[in-house]
Image (tube, rainbow, N blue to C red):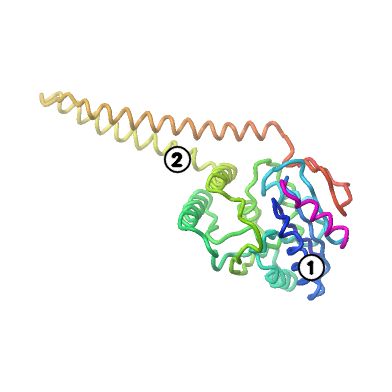
Amino acid sequence: MLSVVIPAYNEEKNVLIAAQRITSVLDENDIEHELIFVNDGSADKTWEQICAESAKDSRVKGICFSRNFGKESAIFAGLKYAKGDAVVLIDCDMQHPPETIIEMYNIWKNNDVDIVEGKKASRGKENIFYKAFSKMFYGLIKHASGLDMTAASDFKLIDRKAVDALNEMPERLTFFRAMSSWVGFKTEYVYFDVAERENGKSGWSVKSLFKYAINSITSFTSAPLHAVTVCGVIMLIIAIILAANTLYNKIVGNAMEGFTTVILLQLITSSIIIISLGIIGFYISKIYEEIKDRPRFIVRELKNIEDTLEKKQ
């Protein structure tokens, strides 16, 4: 059986379309399945639409959070409650084409493959800032972790073995795209063109994208902490060179007041110190979040799902 996990945040106009399109594609190919919509604390009638679809088709299931916990939590909630031999993650806005699921399924079923990852052949309509930000973000991830995620997406099929491995990972602060690569397993790729949203606007603002990027990087790699050390070493080299130059000028009697140099050095060093403290503080806040051991999400209501699983992640 194939489980299809669909995170949804303020997607009341897309729930029906997503359920119909995905179900139609899977039924046409005789694939036994379940659809698991995860309502991530939507402010509109997303949950009501999920309940309506669940009432019409028992294969449509719903998980409703007590509040907005974020897409990462919604993904892992779906993985936790999915019962399929494989699980597909797909966006509710239908920018991930449901037809590609069949290609993923056939690759998984007919080959010794555990993960079939959807990569973006084209990114659709994006503004210049978004494209530049994405390129910089994935460049940092590649440099920090060695994982090339330039065209990566959350759209992927994962075998039960890999799903169980992800569910066993204890951290509360997660980055699914990187974690699904980190667990290893045999991976194949399919390419898709990002479609236009069926309805509504993206919930990702510049602020939320920046926050997501910072949280993802710090959740998955300690590279920024090492950058602090690199900055310290660079400043040490500069300090040694300037100290040698100052002593030489003093000895030969060419010493100058050097007021501008002193001010510039103070500005540079104080900036690096403050930024370094900020990076260290951010990691300390992550440690604080982890040791509190709070659940990744809290489930308020379930539809067509037996509540026999632990809700605490």
Q: Is residue 296 above or below residue 91?
A: above
Magenta segment main secondary structure = helix
Foreground residue among 27 and 277:
27
In the image, is residue 56 part of the stretch drawn in magenta? yes
Foreground residue among 249 and 265:
265
Write the start and end of the magenta stretch as one range: 42-57
- In the image, 238: left or right of 87? left
Q: Is residue 180 above or below residue 218?
A: below
State the separation of the CA atoms marked 2 and 1.
48 Å
Q: Is residue 199 above or below residue 210?
A: below
Q: Quadrant of residue 19?
A: bottom right
Three-letter amino acid code at disc 2? Ala
In the rendered structure, find residue 23 and report the number of the disc placed on it.
Answer: 1
**Could you classify mark 2 by the number of other residues whose Cα lies within 10 Å: few (under 14), some (14-19), or many (20 or more)?**
few
Q: Quadrant of residue 34?
A: bottom right
In the image, is residue 44 part of the stretch drawn in magenta? yes
In the rendered structure, find residue 227 and report the number of the disc placed on it.
Answer: 2
Question: How far from the left and from the top, in percent, is residue 290?
Answer: 66, 35
